Image (tube, rainbow, N blue to C red):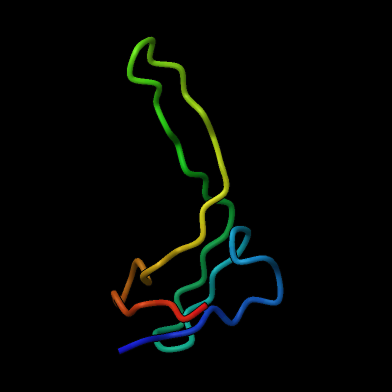
Amino acid sequence: MTCRNESVYASCDEFICSECGTHLTDWRKVDIEYDDGTEWYGEYSFKYCPNCGREVEE
């Protein structure tokens, strides 16, 4: 089963699930450097809806 991101903005800025209606904004992916613990923040697009678990079609 799949869903779509119905947001009019970039998929890394807003997510609206076409199936369950979950609406998320302003998230960040945090990567931590193994050697010294430095945190890196980056953009992230969901592969699966965090609420209903459906795969997000690109």
Q: Is residue 14 above or below residue 58?
A: above
Where residue 57 appears, as percent x and y from the top left, is: 46, 81
Q: Is residue 26 above or below residue 8?
A: above
Q: Quadrant of residue 19?
A: bottom left
In the image, 6 versus 56, the foreground residue is: 56
Where residue 7 appears, as percent x and y from the top left, is: 63, 76
In the image, 58 versus 25, the foreground residue is: 58
Q: Residue at x 52, y 64 (%)?
A: 24
Q: Quadrant of residue 31?
A: top left
Number of numbered labels in the structure image: 0
Q: Is residue 27 above or below residue 3?
A: above
Q: Residue at x 54, y 69 (%)?
A: 15
The residue sitting at the right extreme is: 8
In the image, 12 versus 25, the foreground residue is: 12
Where residue 28 appears, as percent x and y from the top left, is: 52, 45
Q: Residue at x 33, y 71 (%)?
A: 51
Where residue 12 appears, as percent x and y from the top left, is: 59, 59
Left or right: residue 10 compared with residue 31: right
Left or right: residue 23 compared with residue 51: right
Q: Is residue 39 above or below residue 48?
A: above
Left or right: residue 33 compared with residue 43: left
Quarter of the image that includes the N terminus: bottom left
Q: Quadrant of residue 53?
A: bottom left
